[in-house]
Image (cartoon, rainbow, N blue to C red):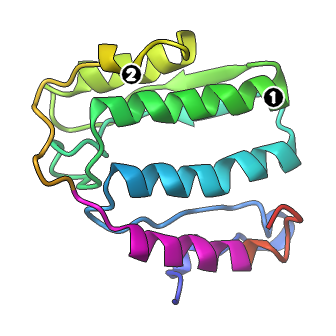
Amino acid sequence: MRIPKRSKPGSGKGEGLNINLPLPMRTGERSYLYALNEIFPPLAKEFKPDIIIANGGSDAHFADHLGSLGLTARGFFEISQIIGSVSEEVCDGKVILLVGSGYNIKVLPYCWYALAFGLINPDTSIEKIEDFFPPPRDPWQNLEKVEKIVYSLKDILSKYWSCF
């Protein structure tokens, strides 16, 4: 599978440090979390940052028609649990969570709450995370396509990172 140019790993002194995971529209929550787990933890463990800065926009929510990735508020909670867990391991839990994007004002507070809550209270039951909209009955899943993208990206990154 060909990876789009925007996911090329940088150039010059930054070569190998620019990592963009181009997920397709309607990725779906399970596929999104799969991709995040496959790429982020191994890279963070090898890179060992002093702090993790996470951009937590809500445009990946299924009710945000600009992002069209298909996440629920619970998915955002799981994302921040992953980030928090990795940050504990690699940088003593130092995380800055930026919240700022998203285009459906009805879901913004639910997504941002879920992101913050997942960092602050990662052991909380996911059942406590609510969504403004009921989740779709037939959630999007694009796992096969996402697996191919992740595989291709790992292949590209293996030139720069031993974790792949």
Residue 114 drawn at (x, y percent): 38, 21
Q: Residue 89: which disc?
A: 1
Q: Is residue 57 visible?
A: no
- Helix, strand or loop for disc 2: helix
Please state the horizontal and vertical placement of residue 115, each as a whole percent of the image: 43, 24
Per the model, the C-alpha gap separating discs 1 and 2 is 22 Å
Q: Where is residue 23? Give x, y as percent.
A: 42, 65
Write down the region rendered in magenta. 140-155
> Relative to residue 100, is residue 103 drawn left or right?
left
Mark 1 burial class by Cα count in 10 Å: few <14, some 14-19, many 20+: some
Q: Nearer the viewer, mark 1 or mark 2?
A: 2
Residue highlighted by disc 2 = 126
Above/below status of 130 relative to 103: above
Residue at position x 50%, y 26% in the image: 98
Give the side of residue 14 with respect to residue 83, left or right: right
Q: In the image as oriented, which residue stretches furthest toward the bottom?
A: 1
